[in-house]
Image (cartoon, rainbow, N blue to C red):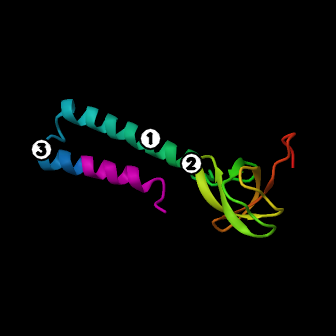
Amino acid sequence: MVSHIVIPIIIIAIVIAALVLTGEYANPIVAIPSMAIVGFISYRIGYVIYKTRKRNLYTYVGKIGKAIEDIPLNGEGYVVVEGEMWKAIAEEPIVEGDRIIVTGMEGLKLRVKKLTSDGKN
């Protein structure tokens, strides 16, 4: 992954090269707003990368979904979690239409079990 400082440096280098090639680097009416815009964009890119680099978008443990087919004990079938269809491994027999809760992940398969009527496992 690209370091969080490389992208702003590339943007700044491109703007400086453009100012030098056009001869506008000495004109403060062009140079100052250009560098302010580049600085702001660089700050925002760095901020977003810093805030999102440790976030795991694929944490499904504890999420509730619905079985779209019968799944036997330790068998595989399909479930829908947050609008996405996933292949799942059942820790107990699950019938089509049952609400399920995700207990873990194994690669791209979810480990699931039936959600009881009181909302607990």
The residue located at (84%, 62%) in the rendering is 92
Dot 3: element:
loop
* Label 2 or label 1, whichever comes before in sequence order: 1
**Where is residue 94 drawn, in percent x and y?**
78, 58
| Residue 79: assigned label | none
Question: Magenta includes 2?
Answer: yes
Task: Give the vertical position of 42 relative to 58 (above or below).
Answer: above
Callout 3 amino acid: Gly
Looking at the rendered image, the disc whose residue lies closer to the viewer, 3 or 1, is 1
Specify the segment rendered in magenta: 1-15
Asked whether disc 3 touches disc 1, contact meaning CB atoms under 8 Å apart, the reply is: no
Q: Which residue is mark 3?
A: 23
Mark 1 lies on a secondary structure that is helix
Instruction: Inspect the image, locate mark 1, and give the three-letter code of the amino acid beneath it.
Output: Tyr
Expressed as whole percent of the image width and height from the top left, the position of residue 38 reads 33, 40
Of the residues shown, which amino acid type is indicated by label 2?
A: Thr
Which of pointers 2 and 1 indicates the residue nearer the eye? 2
Please tell me which residue is depicted at 63% across the width and 66% down the height of the picture: 108
Q: CA distance from mark 2 to mark 3?
A: 38 Å
Return the residue nearer the eye: 76 or 36.
76
Give the residue at mark 2: 52
CA–CA distance in space, label 3 to label 1: 26 Å
Residue at 78 percent of width and 66 percent of height = 72
Query: Counting other residues with Cα less than 10 Å from the Cα at mark 1, is it few (<14), some (14-19), or many (20 or more)?
Result: some
How would you rate the neighbour count of disc 2 (Cα within 10 Å): few for under 14, some for 14-19, many for 20 or more? Answer: few
Does the stretch in magenta take in 30?
A: no
Q: Tell which of 6 and 121 is nearer to you.
A: 121
Q: Residues within 10 Å of mark 3 (few under 14, many from 20)?
A: few
Front position among marks 2 and 3:
2
Judging by the rendered image, the residue that carries numbered circle 1 is 43
**Most frequent secondary structure within the magenta stretch:** helix
Q: What residue is rendered at 75% in x and 50% in y? A: 98
